[in-house]
Image (cartoon, rainbow, N blue to C red):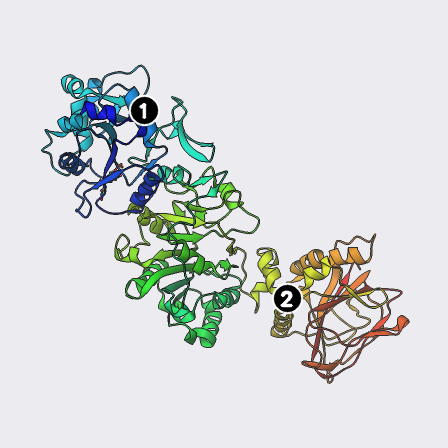
Amino acid sequence: AIQTLLHCNFSTGCNLLVVTVATKETDGFRRFMRSARHFNYTIKVLGRGEPWKGGDYMTEPGGGQKVRLLKAGLQEIEEDKVVLFIDSYDVVFASGPKELLKKFQQTRHKVVFSAETLIWPDRHLEDKHPHFREGKRFLGSGGFIGYVPNLKEMVADWTGEDSDSDQLFFTKIYINPEKRKSINITLDNRCRMFHNLHGSLDEVVLKFEDGQVRARNVLYDTLPVVIHGNGPTKLQINYLSNYIPTVWTFETGCSVCLEDLRPLSGLKSDYPLVVIGIFIQQPTPFVSVFFETLLKLEYPKNRLKLFIYNQEQHHEVAVSSFLKDHGEEYQDVKVIGPEENMDRVASRNLGLDMCRQDKDCEYFFSMDIEVVLKNKDTLKILIEQNEPIIAPMITREGRLWTNFWGALSADGYYARSEDYVDIVQGRRVGVWNVPYLTKVYLVKASLLHEELSNNDLFSSGTLDLDMAFCHNARNKGVFMYVTNMHTFGRMLSTENYQMSHLHNDLWQIFENPKDWEERYIHENYTKIMRDKLIETPCPDVYWFPLFSDIGCDHIVQEMENFGQWSGGRNTDTRIQGGYENVPTIDIHMTQINYEKEWQKLLLDYIAPITETMYPGYYTKAQFDLAFVVRYKPDEQPFLRPHHDASTFTINIALNQKVLDYQGGGCRFIRYNCSVEAPRKGWALMHPGRLTHYHEGLRTTAGTRYIAVSFVDP
Ligand code: UDP
């Protein structure tokens, strides 16, 4: 054997064989194999397809099965090989065979075990362990390297059960001075080759260098070759292996994100069948927008089935009107309404089950109602990424809140990983293995028949339902990923959502300003501001789009729903002094409790225009009077010439001439200039006093609505 060794040059690494046990191809095993391939290790896998009887790290000591398989496996390996025997579900390589062999050779021993800080499983054996000047004193069986004859000698006496402890077996050999000497065993006590993370998490930092990432032990200043998330450090190895060895680097970004994809090309009718679970668990703004977005999702609807769980009476209308108009377009729809009184956990289990029970279902796509998916391709992108469970990263506008956690605290709650902020803010882009996902994620149906076949995944003691689901996935070794390779959308705040109005979303300008803007502000508003396309129909009168069609409709409907239109008389108890010189038939914003929101609208969307068009004038958009006026031929058809009690006035047309009414408009008498064809959603801005004496022109048919604000009275 020695002879051959000399021929096979050590520095080539050719005589190294990696041996591992993997009864199943878990996500962890695939990760291990990827890192092994990266460094060209030669791998021999033992135990494929066997049932696992070796226990798991959370219960009893176990692992005896690995010794049995190694003992048998060694018989088939040439005597001149150096064998690295390691776990694979929670192991990644940080470097290649040459470095490993070199370090092995430098130990001048024939068998080298990984070392551990903590003694396990029998702490009574502590005294029997030799002392080192520095480093870890105890043996870890999750990784060792040695010459085949020495390894054979070491396992020769194994007659244990599969469920016996491999670590205890090897420890007893190691602490026996004769055996230690004859087999020539030592420990890699300063982590030059192996790093077991359990008990040593504080010693490890990521080291980015030259397009490569390694873990560095800062206590011994070493760069281990094999990184092992033994025992309860599975999440830490998941974190480290988001980087090690070249998964994500500063130079290349993500290097594995385009591997093993499932491209969705070809016929739309061949797209995988997806069950989309939609969960309405609390009163939420913009529910109708959610369904509009769902409708626009780029995916053939006949390849989609919907599971809708709605716990809120309040949202019944939105759900049923969506289903009435579009339910038929989907392959199937199942609805659990508030009347069924189903609890949340049961609804989640049932949703998953709809996919599990359906032999054609390939994915379950879970979406909570507060998710705002701006990316129409989200579902396709997630499927193509081809991961077991994957979420699109969505954020809370202007905050660091997202739908994933980068780490878990000791008690299983949120903890911030070191890379969390970089991921959220897009400085690190990739597909990240994380311990917790919520709100929106895609699950492969194959998991539902295997690792996640338990039909009660959403309950687990005191954990809330997402935590329970993620807890179960983690315990089964199923990897969960979040991708920030694209922008996908955001999540709504459901706080401060009032339900006392007809269109409650109108009140969301503070809580969800972005969604409010997208819903209610005219699509050309920003463009017109940017390109200075504001029109001037009369001297010092400016005209620009402000509200969307829906914005106008909701305001009008809200007012009509409130219904307490004023009588149009001079006495008006709503205003200071109780006397209105030029009365209209109207409802004040204060009457529907909309004054704070209206002021915010004026401040955010009007004040910038005012200050551009009337340079040198600064406004805080104060107002006493803002109201919606209704003109009808048989009620109040026009308004006689008058000045406004304002520095400037905003007059917004809330419906469309010809379509909704005839006549109408506004005439500025001093200039003999009229705006006779108001445009729905557009605002007129003009000085209130002195120069802009004006009148409301006669509405001759239908009903005309305008929203008027006297700003800076
Ligand atoms: N293993 C296996 N099948 C199983 C469980 C474990 O083949 O069902 C192998 C695999 O190589 C794994 C090793 O046994 O890495 C040790 O198991 P685990 O990672 O759970 O133990 P720990 O490293 O935490 O002691």
Amino acid on which the number 2 mark rests in the picture: Ile
Q: Quadrant of ligand 1?
A: top left
> Any mark on residue 102, and which?
1
The one nearer the camera, 148 or 634, is 148
**Pointer 2: residues within 10 angstroms few (<14), some, or many (20+)?**
few
Q: On the rendered structure, is 466 left or right of 567?
A: left
Is the C-beta of the residue carrying label 1 under 8 Å from the nearest atom of ligand 1? Answer: no
Residue 158: image x %, image y %? 11, 31
Whether residue 195 can be seen here: no
Q: Which residue: 87% across, 69% down?
A: 693
User: Depth-wise, is mark 2 or mark 1 nearer the camera?
Assistant: 1
Q: Which residue: 71% across, 79% down?
A: 657
Closer to the chain start, of discs 2 and 1, is 1
Marks 2,1: beta carbons within 8 A: no
Is residue 696 positioned above or below 388 on the image? below
Q: On the rendered structure, is 19 left or right of 624?
A: left
Residue 179: image x %, image y %? 14, 20
Q: On the rendered structure, is 231 left or right of 52?
A: right
Q: Secondary structure beneath disc 2?
A: helix
Farthest residue in the top direction? 133
Whether residue 392 can be seen here: yes
Residue 466: image x %, image y %? 38, 52
What residue does disc 2 label? 592
The mark total stands at 2
**Pointer 1: residues within 10 angstroms few (<14), some, or many (20+)?**
some
Q: Which image quarter is the C terminus in?
A: bottom right
